Amino acid sequence: MTGQPVAPPAAAPAKPPLSRNRDYRLLWTSQALAEFGVNATIIAFPLLVLALTGSAAASGLVLGTIAAAQLAAGLPAGALVDRWNRKRLMLGCEAAQAVAAASLVAVLLWGTATVPHLVAVAAVFGLCAALFEPAEESCLPNLVEPEQLPTAIAMNSARGYLGHLSGTAAGGFLFTLGRFVPFAADVVTHTAAFCTLAFVRVPARAKVEVERKHLGREIADGLRWVWRHQHIRVTMLCAVVLNLFFSAFYIVVIVLAQRRGVPSGQIGIMAAMLGIGGIAGALLAPYLHRVLSPYQSIAGVFWALTVLTPAAVFVHNGYAMGGLFAAMALLPPAANTTIMTQQLLLTPDHLRGRLSSVLGLVTGVAATIGPVLGGVLAQTLDGSRPVLVCAVGMAVVTVAVTASGTLRGFPTHQTAATDVAADPSHNHPKEMEMDDNARYEVLRNDEDQYSLWLAGQEVPAGWHRVGREGSKEECSAYVDEVWTDMRPRSLREQMDGAASS
């Protein structure tokens, strides 16, 4: 048996609606500025390297450094995010990117720019992305109410699509005005982002007694947390597969369009339509999140892509293909919103940085392998066969997702939001939906009452570990064995005192 939950502490003041949430709006605005500058810089990087050296390989090296640095720093960054003050970390990232971009402006004006310098600047951008993204995602549940979290995640996704579209379009234009201009714009946007972010009030994190370990052990703790929790593990796998197949399909369609003689201008419109579809999908995601269960949201995306992917075989016009891209990009933001919301609500605050870094690493690897897979398929197979291979692969995964018992039994949005809203700081045991596949530990409070608690979470105030951890059945059997007197200790002492007198 498990103990009855103690009474929750006084509820924290309710946060304002998202539209009037000052701190969230400041955070969103700061990153809208920063993402515009970053995307303008990313499109200008290869143009600058080609102008300086004429080497396509050097251009690839500079761009590849951003992704490589972000992937290499991913897991350590998550552990550091959970160690350090997250707002200061985000401010440091904005400052570092502004300084790095300013150094590039200086050498371009002096005519001393070199490829190693560009590689170093690219590495700074990759490292800052590895640190900033998990820091922002970890702060988000503390800035907004649990029921507002899906909308906040969706709006951040829309911000990313918007930054990519506007920054990429502006970067090429700014480069024509002068080689240093896109990077100067990046200095301005990161400086503005720093100043805006400085006014964001991030609530203080609850003090949790967590043993400070070697960084490698803290990374391992995060990996174990993800692996032990089946719901998190399965939804992360869904996100990985979705990124893998979609990025492979994207390259296949671009190559197929070129082979069919589609003008390059129309191919550019195809890519833009993908971004427009993503923005529309992100705006639609909060509504879909409310009306669909997590299972319906995730499985629905896979079914939509399975149905739409083969249509590329019959579409020969660039504008029509752009419409297909927009349709395919419409639903993934809803699935990503569902996945991120559930994972953040299921994970204690002191592990959220590591959760985000693990998810970012595996989806980043998938996004890197996907284009390679698509290129190999397009190179080795003739005609429309690469599209059909992608379609078959997606169909197989869709069947597996549809049959997944874990996704079918996933907690509803309302249940997860209600649990966290009732206990935003995770500081007292409460009734929870038991997961037979999770590991638990036994807690005892000052009244000698016992309760089960998910292993790896912070111990609530007034409760203490007894050193027993295992499956639900093992921990419950231990509680049944040792908790033979159900009376709270204070009541026992009172009754014993009355009896002796």
Image (cartoon, rainbow, N blue to C red):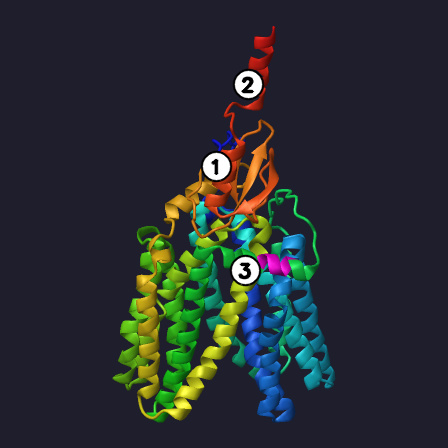
Neighbours of disc 3 within 10 Å: few (<14), some (14-19), many (20+): many
- Which residue appears farthest toward the top when viewing the image? 501
Q: 253 or 295: which is nearer to us?
A: 295
Q: Is residue 358 above or below residue 83?
A: below
* Image coordinates for residue 121, horizontal then vertical, percent: 67, 76
Identify residue for label 2. Answer: 491
- Residue at 60%, 57% (x, y): give it: 221
Neighbours of disc 1 within 10 Å: few (<14), some (14-19), many (20+): some
Identify residue for label 3. Answer: 356
Identify residue for label 1. Answer: 430
Distance between the Cα atoms at labels 1 and 3? 25 Å
Q: Which segment is the magenta one? A: 218-222
Which secondary structure is most common in the magenta stretch?
Answer: helix
- Residue at 65%, 74% (x, y): give it: 123
- In primary-sequence order, the first of circles 1 and 3 is 3
- From the image, state whether disc 1 or disc 3 is nearer to you: 1
